[in-house]
Amino acid sequence: MAKQKQKQVATKELIPSRYQNWIAILSIAVVVIVFFWGAITSGGFVDFDNLASWSFKPYLEEASREGRFPQWVPLIFSGMPSYASLLVTGNRLWDVVAEIFINISVVFGQIFGSDVARVLFFYILYGCGIYWLLLYKKFTKTVSLFASVVAIFSTYVITWVMIGHNTKPIVVAMFPFVFLFVEKLKERFNLLHFGLLVVSIAIMFIGNHLQMIFYGGLAFAIYLIYDIIAKIIKKDKPLQTLRSAILLAIAYILAFSMSADRYLSTLEYAPYSVRGSAPIEKVHKDKNQKQNQSDYDYATMWSYSPEELWTFFVPSYFGFGVRDYRESMISTYWGQKESEDSPPYMGILVIGLAILGLIYFRKDIFVQSLFTILIVGVFLSFGKNLPFLYNLFYNYFPSFSKFRAPSMALILVHFTVPILSAYGFWALKKMYDEGVRRRTTFWLIFIPFLFLFFAFIFSAVFKTTYLSAVGSSEVFKQIAKAYGQDVVFELQEFVWKNTLEDWYLNAIFLLAGGTLAVLYINKKVKYGTFFSIIAIITIIDLFRVDVRRMEYSKEQSFKEVFSEREDVYNFIKQDKSIFRIADFSVTPANMTAYYLVENVNGYHAAKLRVYQDLMDVANIEGMAGSTSQLYNPFLWNLLNVKYLVFNRKFEGVEPIYQSQRVAAFVYPNYGMLERAFYAKTTVVAKPIDILYHLKKGDFNPLDTVFVEKPISVQLTPPDTNSKVKFLAKQHEYLQLEAEASGNHILFLSEVYYPPAWKAYIDGKETEIIKANYAFRAIVVPQGKHIIEFKYHSDKFELGRTLSIAGNVVTFLLIGSGIFFSYRKDKKIRI
């Protein structure tokens, strides 16, 4: 009888239950692909960060052809660690899990012939993770699907693919899977689930985004600690959660080992990067600031401000960010951050449902832990603006001080709110089943009316105040300087108009949602109708906001953007000698790397501190503090710059080459010094004084090399018999032939990086001296010698060994888990 009843129920289903999960996953993929179809079928997102990353494709291809793993890139900033700085990654064949995962995403992208689709694979995976987590929590398939889609299309999250932040979605995609497997392991230990937990965390590490990895780990820790304390209080088997916490810690250790080559290299690099050390000027002026301490001002750039919480409800209130204006993209953001691409908007009904779910299920431990994670994320994102929690992490949590942009902590909000919105649907279903008092339904209508009332008051009373605040912001002051006050007035009206439009439209959405909820609770509307309308309104709401930042190339692909400048670099590369260029004609500055030309400029958020100090202190007046360009002609000479490229022609100076396709003019630099040369003597000076000498250019580098400590041997000036020349020059290896008439100081115009660069004279290691603040020098004894500079990181080699071991253990775990699960299922069938 029971079987017959089940059969009758099954026949009533529109889609058979065994296909429903597959249909849900397909739906997630279809929605994502449809939204991005224009970008997939065109040139993709030719954005600043995307171009900066694509610039290194030929560099990686060259390394692959030569069978070497790239660890040093000489193509930007005169050279910097490429792998340790997380700039690029070569073929990590020893990390099998990473290779399999990355290649799956690559194949997915190839199906559509688009790199955008490759990145969208991670979004689809994220949606699937939310879906399966909520199914495990006993939510219906429709509600689970709703939460998965709104999680993907939270404006803050979906913008990443548009602006080239392609490592973030890899990490965040694994958040729900980690929660899912931790939940399963709380219920009972399963070797396969533990192995999959390790793989999920390992994929997070593959993403390379340390800040997002940290926030994920913080969320998991908060949940487990909260759950353990709650169960201790209730005396409800706390050991089960404690077991899960221990297993999670072991999984983290195993997952870290699988990427140990990457992160041990990064830890080795951190003290020498701008993220792990303070600017020399700050150290010089502030006696309390130590060189090896992170810079608080740098770390707290892009701190979210409490007043910007209003963008959760009215996305355009602070100007939105970058959006279309008069057929071009312009930033209308007027908040206190350095800049903004889009607001952290999640959908007005999504927030409403989340608040309802939070209130109704406030006694649920999982809901309480999600709310705690959300609150921690909000207060961490405030950074310097409300620093009591942020400073605690900054001062006491290892490596936290090396992160930049506290506003990234909002990912914890964007992860938890969609899940809480599912609880909102559940709350309404409970109200429907149990019946509620009119007072409860009153609030579902009153709050939307109140939101609409505030919109009327704001539009009627506060226009002058609002426009004044917009016009007095730093961003709009800069616009006034560049384009004039008339443009500012136009943009102010544009921002005001869009703020009102968002506010009124969201009030209508909220009122519609509240009315539908009341009708549903009072059994006036069926659940299917209610859910469908809410889902449609939410999709319209999110899509209309998300599409504002959408700017894909309809005409040009990445290759076409780079090919526009091909003639310029082909002209320069006719010169087969060793030299660098100083290119001021491209944005981002990394684009020259596409043609394997060494540039003194570049773009990277974690460059070497010594090089940033050159740009901070030794740049010409007016350009101090540049994060990408060196303008000092004295440094051009010292850095072996042979050609200068500008985007304009200078009056009275003829370029040696002019591009026929873009604004690019090549000029010679006649003062260039060779990449390696002997100097007559050394002078000991303080680091800050050496930088001042470089800025003023008040010494002859062929005569004097500034050092920070005395040389232990007696030096003799070179004579006409003293010679040096390059025999081999590769990215991680330099070989020179030297002849010295005495003990000479050999200056090498290569960036100083002591952890990995080693020098050898006739096979015997010799000290690399920090010269002219940011460069290398060695003492060459009398006679003929072969000099070698080799890049070798002991941390990398140790990490590679650990990675192999971690992969072996993980595959054994998964293999054993599959075997035991199969045996168990076989016994049950018997």
Image (tube, helix red, strand yellow):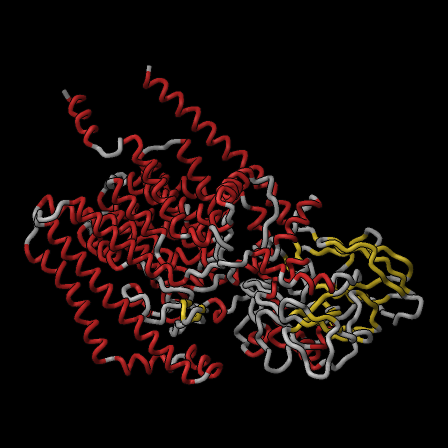
The answer to whether residue 521 is visible is: yes
Quadrant in the picture for the N terminus: top left
567 lies left or right of 213: right
Q: Quadrant of residue 824?
A: top left
Q: Could you say which is closer to the camera, residue 514 or residue 690?
A: 514
Give the quadrant of the C terminus: top left
At x 21%, y 33%, the residue is 13
The image position of residue 282, as x and y in percent, is 55, 75
Q: Is residue 824 above or below residue 584?
A: above
Across and down, in percent, residue 116 comes to 48, 51
**Total of numbered circles in the picture?**
0
Residue 760: tell me if it is visible.
no
Q: Quadrant of residue 797?
A: top right
Choose between 330 and 424: the one closer to the eye. 330
Question: Is 99 left, or right, of 9 in this rendering?
Answer: right
316 horizontally vs 576: left or right: left
In this rendering, the answer to whether 403 lies above or below 462 is above
Residue at 24% x, 55% y is 537
Residue most extreme to the right: 721
Q: Which quadrant holds residue 138? A: top left
Residue in the image at 64% along x and 80% along y: 620
Work out whether residue 574 or residue 227 is closer to the camera in this orientation and state it.
Answer: 574
**Residue 202 in the image: x percent, y percent?**
48, 43
Residue at 74% across / 54% down in the picture?
A: 730
Q: Position of residue 411 (x, y in %)?
A: 38, 56
